[in-house]
Amino acid sequence: MTILIFFGILSGITTILFGFGGGFVTVPLLYTYLLLHYPDGDIPLYAMQISVATSALIMIFSASISSFQSHKKGLIDWQIIKPLLFSISLGGCLGAFIASIVQGEWIRWIFIIYLAITILDALFSKSFTTQNPNMARNLKRKYDAILGVFIGSIAAFLGVGGSIMTVPLMRKRCALMQEAAAMANPLTLPMAITTTIVYLLISTSEGLQFGSGFLGFLYLKAAGILILSAWIGIKIGAKIQHFIPDKIYARAYPFLLMIVLAVMLFQ
């Protein structure tokens, strides 16, 4: 339980600072935790699906709290993200359905490959690392519906919340890291809701039961602990957010992802 609390706090801090944390922290954590604590029965066979589904449930709460905090600070331009909200929800349903019928080991390796690509892009893309004081208002809305479905599908399939794509997207469109991270959280919320519902419906319709503390693919016992501790982390992150220079902020992003990549590779 102690390790869940620690990583829940870490998840909350990274959620508000970088727009990610729900997926990139909790998916590897839960995957490892499940394999260690439930080595027998059906749980190891569905460990990745359980991790992704539970991560989505946690993100409903962490993204809601972070979005509210960022909205109060004026960091979210709702006109910018509004065109993406519905299409990301639609993509979330599609991605969750595909993930539920694909082997967990495949999901794990796709997660690892996508993570590596994102790290390289963040390290070597000048549009990501270079500070630009202008707010991202030049969105190409003509393609946002298609882009939203793609983001939602990948995010739900991997259980990462979509911020891995929306934060670099907003950086390329001239947002500061604070703004990019802030706008990633409300964009995560519709995907998290639809993903949780789809995973729950699929697991219950197939009659999957994993014992006490589980509801289908949802590991409710761990989710409760992680949600409460993430709330503490969000409070901590909100206090230190304004003291981090944008350049350091942007450079820290890929290095945090490297830690998650290492966990997924060597577990």
Image: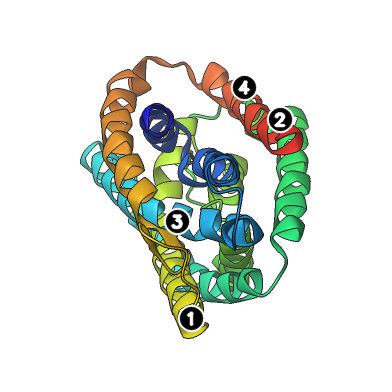
Q: How many marks?
A: 4
The answer for how far apart the CA atoms under marks 4 and 3 are is: 29 Å
- In front of the other: 26 or 136: 26
Q: Which residue is mark 1?
A: 207
Q: Position of residue 158 (x, y in %)?
A: 62, 56
> Does 25 appear above or below 57?
above
The residue shown at (32%, 29%) is 233
Which residue is tagged 4? 251
Residue visible at 50% across and 42% down? 26
Under mark 4, the amino acid is: Arg
Residue occupying image coordinates x 54% and y 30%:
132
124 sits to left or right of 150: right
Quadrant of the drawing holding the C terminus: top right
Q: State the SS at label 1.
A: loop
The three-letter amino acid code for the residue at tag 3 is: Thr
Nearer to us of marks 4 and 2 is 2
User: What label sits on residue 262 in the rendered view?
Assistant: 2
Q: Are marks 2 and 1 in contact (CB under 8 Å)?
A: no
Identify residue for label 3: 54
Q: Earlier in the sequence, mark 1 or mark 4?
A: 1
Callout 3: helix, strand or loop?
A: helix
Which class describes the residues within 10 Å of circle 2: few (<14), some (14-19), or many (20+)? few
Q: Secondary structure at mark 2?
A: helix
